[in-house]
Image: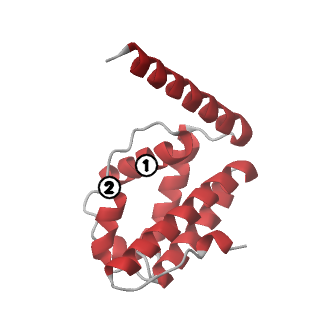
Amino acid sequence: MSDRLKAEREAAAERRSLLVQDAIERTGITEEMIGELVTRFYGRVREDALLGPVFAVVKDWDEHLAKLRNFWSSVVLMTGRYHGQPMRAHLPLSLIGDHFDRWLDLFEQTARDVCPPAAAALFIDKARRIADSFEMASATVAGRIAAPRHMLRS
């Protein structure tokens, strides 16, 4: 690896570290908080009349929850621990707008229950972006067009 490339990678790692530290200081997000949010949220999802059947395909919930903790850690703390392809995993599920709306309703409620306000706001912002992205991709695969709509939620 060239010295220039090495220096650029080190600078990028330092910027990422500063961004993460700033997010932690502003929000108080910890790995423990992420774990609690994921556990409570997916407990609610599994019991939900609309979403429960969608998630019934999960065979090993301990493994799935570990993957989800890594996902959210990567999303909010930029840890890079998640290496999956969530879009690919969700596209075959034939999800529609009602699924995304309910997923967000439960997620936002759980984030507000588990997290202090600044942390809940960050999680909710990321979740809305994810819901929009997944919904637009699902619509595209189904031959429809969907505009982002979750970022507009109040």
At 27% from the left and 57% from the top, the residue drawn is 60
Q: Residues within 10 Å of mark 2 (few under 14, many from 20)?
A: few
Q: Does the rendering let one see residue 56?
A: no
Tell me the kind of residue under disc 1: Phe
- Which quadrant of the view contains residue 76? top right
Kindly identify which residue carries mark 1: 71
As measured in the structure, the alpha-carbon distance from the residue carrying label 2 to the one carrying label 1 is 10 Å
Kindly identify which residue carries mark 2: 85
From this view, report whether residue 5 is shown above or below residue 149. above
Tell me the kind of residue under disc 2: Gln
Q: Out of 125 and 111, give the one closest to the viewer.
A: 125
Q: Position of residue 105 (x, y in %)?
A: 59, 73
Mark 2 / mark 1, whichever is N-terminal: 1
120 on left or right of 13: right
Q: Nearer the viewer, mark 2 or mark 1?
A: 2
Q: Position of residue 30 (x, y in %)?
A: 59, 38
* Quadrant occupied by the C terminus: bottom right
Q: Residues within 10 Å of mark 1 (few under 14, many from 20)?
A: many
Q: Position of residue 145 (x, y in %)?
A: 44, 83
Q: Out of 12 and 101, give the one closest to the viewer.
A: 12
